[in-house]
Image (tube, rainbow, N blue to C red):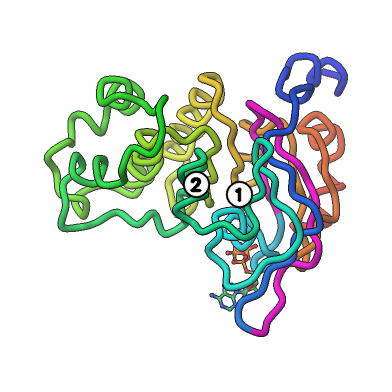
Amino acid sequence: MSSVAVEKASPALNAAPMLKIDNLSAWYAESKVLHGMSFDVREGELLTLIGRNGAGKTTTLRSIMGIVQKRTGSINFNGTELVGKRTFQIARLGIGYCPEERAIFSSLSVQENLFLPPVLREGGMTDEQLYATFPNLKARANSQGTKLSGGEQQMLAIARILRTGSRLLLLDEPSEGLAPVVVKEIGETIQRLKAQGFTIVLVEQNLRFARLVADRHVVVENGRVVDILTNAELEADMGRVKSYLGV
Ligand SMILES: Nc1ncnc2c1ncn2[C@@H]1O[C@H](COP(=O)(O)OP(=O)(O)OP(=O)(O)O)[C@@H](O)[C@H]1O
């Protein structure tokens, strides 16, 4: 399929930006980790951040959520500037963050974990909608967090932020450490969420997974954006991205 055909097939590529990141820099203590990153995320789009270990992908998500000590530049979400805002204020605007470590509370049941974050704004999924989207979790509603498989924990971590009313989802390596069959399930879930109109930024090392779900890819290297390409462009020239990733 030509890139033009794919771009036509993905209306999100022509949508207005929901998040505009301009000249973003971020620090951990004295150490500058992001060096003037700029990219945007369009409404309804699924955008991946790809790049080697330590490139700054997680830090980009943490900067959007305000979980770094210092950041400069601009992160504009639907017209509101996020630089200067606190994490709870950012969450209330409708941004949900699912960290790499998943943060499932082992002593709590699935249901308790699910209902832990407060509903922050209207439009969040109801319990029925959540359990319809994640039928495995319904069957495990009273199981303790620790008794879940890695895939179930990942599903729970994603489900938890859907209740809150978030419309922009920041997902950090949901495929990490999971068996291929489970990665496929997570991919299908993410595609369903996109079809439901969620906008998603996905940090992903697994290119095979990223290609299946994404509209566009932002390549991060040493805290800088070194390339932005549509999924069709990636399909047409895998070598372009593999050279960045060293694979
Ligand atoms: N809490 C921290 N304190 C100090 N430096 C950090 C901290 N977290 C990350 N770093 C450093 O910031 C840089 C970017 O890390 P980041 O986790 O954003 O990369 P990444 O692209 O997400 O890679 P990975 O997939 O390995 O997590 C790395 O050099 C890392 O060592």
Residue that appears at 41% across and 59% down:
101
Q: Quadrant of residue 161?
A: top left
Left or right of residue 241: residue 46: left
Q: Are marks 2 and 1 in contact (CB under 8 Å)?
A: yes
The range drawn in magenta is: 30-50
Left or right of residue 126: residue 142: left
Number of labelled discs?
2
Q: Tell me the element at label 1.
A: loop
Mark 1 residue CB less than 8 A from any atom of ligand 1: no
The residue to which callout 2 is attached is: 175
Q: Earlier in the sequence, mark 2 or mark 1?
A: 2
Residue that appears at 18% across and 36% down:
140
Q: Marks 2 and 1, Cα distance to the nearest angstrom?
A: 8 Å
Residue 155 is situated, as x and y percent measured from the top left of the image, at 36, 39
Quadrant observed for ligand 1 in the rendered image: bottom right
Count residues near mark 2 (Cα–Cα under 10 Å), then give few for <14, some for 14-19, many for 20+: many
The one nearer the camera, 176 or 94, is: 94
Residue 111 is situated, as x and y percent measured from the top left of the image, at 19, 39
The residue to which callout 1 is attached is: 204
Relative height, residue 121 to residue 244 (above, below): above
